[in-house]
Image: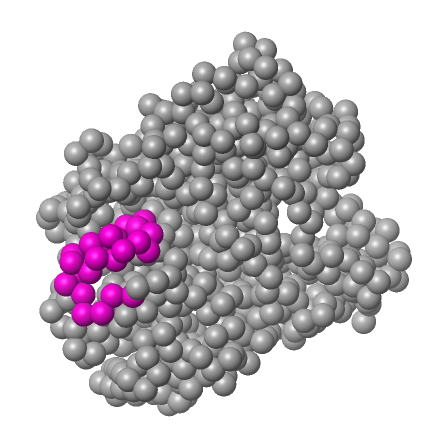
Amino acid sequence: TELFSARRSCTTCPYCGVGCGVAATRESSPGNGEDVIRIQGDEQHPANKGKLCVKGSSLADTLGNHGRLLKPQLHGKECDWETAMAFATSKLRETIDEHGPDSVAFYLSGQLLTEDYYVANKLMKGFIGTANVDTNSRLCMSSAVAAYKRALGADAVPCNYEDLDEAELVVLIGSNAAWTHPILFQRMQAANAKLVVVDPRGSATSEMADMHLAITPGSDAALFNGLLRYLSEYGLTEFGGLDQAFIHNHTDNFTDTLYAAAEWTPEKVAEYCRVELAQLLEFYDLFRTTEKTISFYSQGVNQSSTGTDKNNAIINCHLATGRIGKPGCGPFSITGQPNAMGGREVGGLANMLAAHMDFTDDNINRVGRFWDAAKMAKAPGLKAVELFDAVERGEIKAVWIMATNPAVSMPDARRVAAALKNCPTVIVSDCVGDTDTARCADLLLPATTWGEKNGTVTNSERRISRQKSFLPKPGKARHDWEIICDVARRLGFAEAFDFQSAADIFREHAALSGFENNRDQARRAFDISALANISDQEYDFLTPVQWPVNAEHPHGAVRLFSDGDFYTPNGRARFIPVQPQCPKQETREEFPLLLNSGRLRDQWHTMTRTGRARKLLDHSEAPELHLHPRDAARFGIEDAQLVRVESEKGQFFGRAKVTSNQKPGQLFAPIHWSDSLAYNATVSALAIPVTDPVSGQPELKQVAVNVEPL
Ligand code: SF4
């Protein structure tokens, strides 16, 4: 359904996982009478209640066709869609016929809408017959997914944003929310909760916090093991210690988990995390005595070779105090991208089927029956790092990358770019024509973008919202789902991909979520079957709603686990024993510093959209390297001087920003620039592709490097 003729469209911001509602209004310019777009926060949207941060409020400045990919390009030459689709189809078919289904892969993005994700996943896992379909969300929150599944039985975020309004203590771990999730940070501030920031780096968030625990990089699990031990010493709930009744009635494996944490005395934690003992005890006591406590965490916890364990160490403390499923409480993982959650729902991760189903025989058969699948994938596919390793080894011979830029964002990114250049077939669909990844493509397919796309996204609190088109498709661009369905039909699967609209896809996705779901406790989590029969009009005006949306929760579920019933087979949450481990990338003589990376306040990913708004560039115009004054003196670097950073994988050039926000020995660089924007500006090129063994998420936050002035 196209709504671009409407004057006011309620849609969703395309940037972060907060998922703010946006009202886009077309108005005639008083000067030339041409339509202009005015952007405001949607006051009816529960995520933001009318507010927008600087990125969201600048969306109108990022519209327009400059830099857009408007026609398909085959080997650098413009072509028509017929030629492009014939090439894509024949290459995929030839590769599958000659080398088998596992020789092809899709790499997706949290920028795609749920409907795009759904058909890509269906084509690969149900018709081509491989699960080699992964997503850049692997780099963002896959450790949070794995930890929720281990502890709660499903990838189910217990909390909602209203809990932030009610919390009395918010512990932000590995998050610079003031910049990365600004609207949620404003909600925390408005609620007057005490804020504790756990982050090696000083940030805009820590400056506004009541306490900043600047732990040594990667030591989060020890901090929370120590907290669990500390809580256990206070015994009963009335003394602010353990919630024995909750542990007894609703959880398993507490004794083993406490045993694993027993060695983490406050003294040992203080030494390991390199924080003052008095400050540590103050934090532990604050947590112990504040019933309404939320732990709010993001990539600083997840982008680690032990990210899943770190997540579980945090969740353990909430289970031990019964602070889950109650107002103002809970372990709250926040996603980076607007639709990382929606992608998870439909099987965007290579280790899951659709609707949060794992690869069990029952689930494979069930999904196969529902889809009337031609060829079901029988086992999990390759996760992001494995996937590009397989491209490099020549095992993946055709890869289709949608709406993302792995030649910039993957660890050891230049090796990924080289692997793509050697890959026999690379198809890239994107809204822009010149990215580092697009430069590796044989075939470029023009896709619609924000303002043109039509579908749904799910934000960090499980809330499904509509993203609506209020602008026509430019040039020859098509929606991602249309491109995928066209290829599927040409591959011979016309009946299964005969979708006429995003609404058609959404209804099928909702129906699958409830299909035979009474057999599996975990599947109760993601069941939106109450939306399976909505009309086109109901879809267009879908009120933002939090899953599950089913017979039990016809209007959605604001908070999960209020009844202490979890999604594990026996309904009990699981404590997970955690053994803290150091980051895999340790400093050494030739690489004596640790490099951290992250987002800036006014930019998003590789700046393909935010880079178009002049006022957003004003905040920071060029790649920077933040370092402590002592390191600046040690390496002979002055503020604003050009520097070269080197790891065993590559180098990065940036301008020095000398700041005591960094601890000595630790550097920080923003992720937004890439080699196609500035010379040697891809910071992920420095990272070694080590991954968490449970989630497959790469360790992007700790890279051993050297630095020198230029
Ligand atoms: Fe967009 Fe996130 Fe800002 Fe909200 S907080 S306006 S979703 S970037």
Residue at 45 percent across and 34 percent down: it is: 574
Camera-side residue of 311 and 29? 311
Location of residue 596 in the rendering, given as x and y in whole percent from the top left corner: 67, 54
Q: Quadrant of the C terminus?
A: bottom right
Location of residue 391 in the rendering, given as x and y in whole percent from the top left corner: 47, 77
In reply to whether residue 300 is colored magenta, the answer given is no
Return the residue found at the far top. 238
Location of residue 108 in the rendering, given as x and y in whole percent from the top left corner: 39, 64
Q: Quadrant of the N terminus?
A: bottom left
Q: Which residues are magenta?
A: 354-377
In reply to whether residue 368 is colored magenta, the answer given is yes
Camera-side residue of 508 and 147? 147
Residue 289 visible at all: no
Residue at 74 percent across and 57 percent down: it is: 586
Residue at 49 percent across and 31 percent down: it is: 253
Answer above or below: position of 436 versus 229.
Answer: below
Camera-side residue of 485 and 537? 485
Answer above or below: position of 36 versus 663.
Answer: below
Colour scheme: one colour
* Residue 162: quadrant of the picture: top left
Residue at 35 percent across and 58 percent down: it is: 348
